[in-house]
Image (spheres, rainbow, N blue to C red):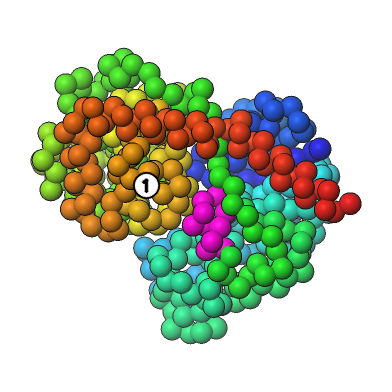
Amino acid sequence: MKILTVSLHNDIYGAGRAAYRLHTGMLQGGECTPSMLCGIRQQPDTTVSEFLHGNMKKTMFQFGIKLNQLPLTRYKTNKNYFFSADGRGHGVYKRINEINPDIVHIHWINHAFMSLREFEKLNMPIVVSCHDMWYFTGGCHYDEECGRYRIGCGTCPALGSRSANDLSAKGYEKRHSIYNRLSKNLTIVGLSRWMADSAKESNLFTNNRVIHLPNGINTSLFKPIDKAMARDLLNLPQNKKLILFGAVDPTSDIRKGYNHLKEALTMIKSDAELIVFGDERNSTRRIDGDRFKEHHVGHIKDEITLTLLYNAADITIVPSRQENLPNVIMESMACATPVVAFNVGGNCDMIEHNVNGYLATPFQAADMAAGIDKLLSNNNILSEAGKNARAKVIAEFDIRNVTTRYIDLYKQILAETK
């Protein structure tokens, strides 16, 4: 059984990292012959081929991004949203058909890497993982509770549009026609229960299979290590409680909720310091002003350093407004570092309130502060939550078990196509 994983990246940002973890899980499992095709390869790996290699192709890639974003220039787009138009791709479908896998599993394809129209030109069953909402909205990656994806989009707040027939409505209709023609040849995977339920609420997948299967994580890599050693290696203080906060552009992307964290930090009673990772563009932008000392460590590109970072922290904070199945939560919990997050999206798939972490009421900063203080003020509660957090990840998200579930899905799809 030949399985091809397709994603823009293979080990950077959340979707690329999750896709690559599934690919490596299949390599270790031995039940199939996996390969991976990405737009731009970060990790050198002979099982991963790079579609956009060489200066010319990468220049074409940058041009494609600008070309696909041209339709947005007609609108006063809202900076609180991330909206991607689906335009022309790079003909990735030709390479996929040349590889000729039994199943192609497609992850994140935006920035003009691959267009949805190319799906119809593929010669094999397609599995799509929804790392965000883009596959079933008119173009936004998260709808900020707009909810218009349920009825066809249009009058899009992400575009600042008052037209019922705007770019989002046209994007939605385009998806509807493509998915309808693909019918049972397309399987949609919601990585969290919330994402799967949201996809089912859309009118787009009435003829397609929609299921829930999570991402997985290597619990032999992301694991507890000596906290003092981790702090020493990262040059972090030994005698302070440390709060970890991070994402891609955590202080720039409003969806990541740094404003809620900033408010919560004004209310906590614990004597703590803050670690911020993932923020390259605003590496000196302070979260809290002058009350807390902050350690900005920038973008972490390797998983060993990430593991050190989670182990150096006492707790991790995820104040996002909307989330699917965040790698940050899963990684932190695997390292036995409990997480405080709002009870939104797929967070509750991993965090069990007052058992292995704390789920605060959205978007009450006071409740988030209460969760932070509860964990940091009692070492016994903190330790027990950490142990429970790791046990939860091992039981439900270990990459070996998750990979087995995906292979079972692939087998089922192939059996149904015979």
Above or below, comparing residue 110 to residue 143 in the picture:
above
Residue 351: percent from left, percent from top: 39, 43
Q: Position of 18 compared to 300: left or right?
A: right
In the picture provided, is 275 more to the left or to the right than 95? left
Give the structural element (helix, strand or loop) at label 1.
loop
Q: Where is residue 206 in the image (x, y as percent from the top left)?
A: 67, 70
Quadrant (top left, top right, bottom left, bottom right) of the N terminus: top right
| Vertical order, 58 against 31 (above or below) | below
Question: Disc 1 marks which amino acid?
Answer: Asp
Task: Report which quarter residue 379 is drawn in.
Answer: top left
Q: Which residue lies furthest to the right in this view?
A: 418
Q: Does the magenta stretch include residue 193?
A: yes
Q: Tell me the residue at 16%/33% (across/down).
A: 377
Q: Closer to the camera, 288 or 372?
A: 372
State the residue at coordinates (69%, 56%).
187
**Residue 338: quarter of image:** top left
- Residue 101 visible in this rendered orientation of the protein: yes
Q: Is residue 22 magenta?
A: no
Which residue is at 73% across, 53% downward?
Answer: 126
Magenta range is: 190-199
Residue highlighted by disc 1: 249
Res 262 visible: no
Residue 46: x, y in percent?
70, 27
Residue 69 pos. (x, y %)? 53, 64
Is residue 373 toward the left or the right of residue 194 in the image?
left
For residue 68, side relative to residue 295 (left or right): right
> 159 and 386: which one is in front?
386
Q: In which quarter of the image is residue 41?
A: top right
Instruction: Say which of 326 and 373 sits in front.
Output: 373
User: Against 274, is 368 above or below?
Assistant: below
Q: Residue at left 64%, top 59%? A: 210
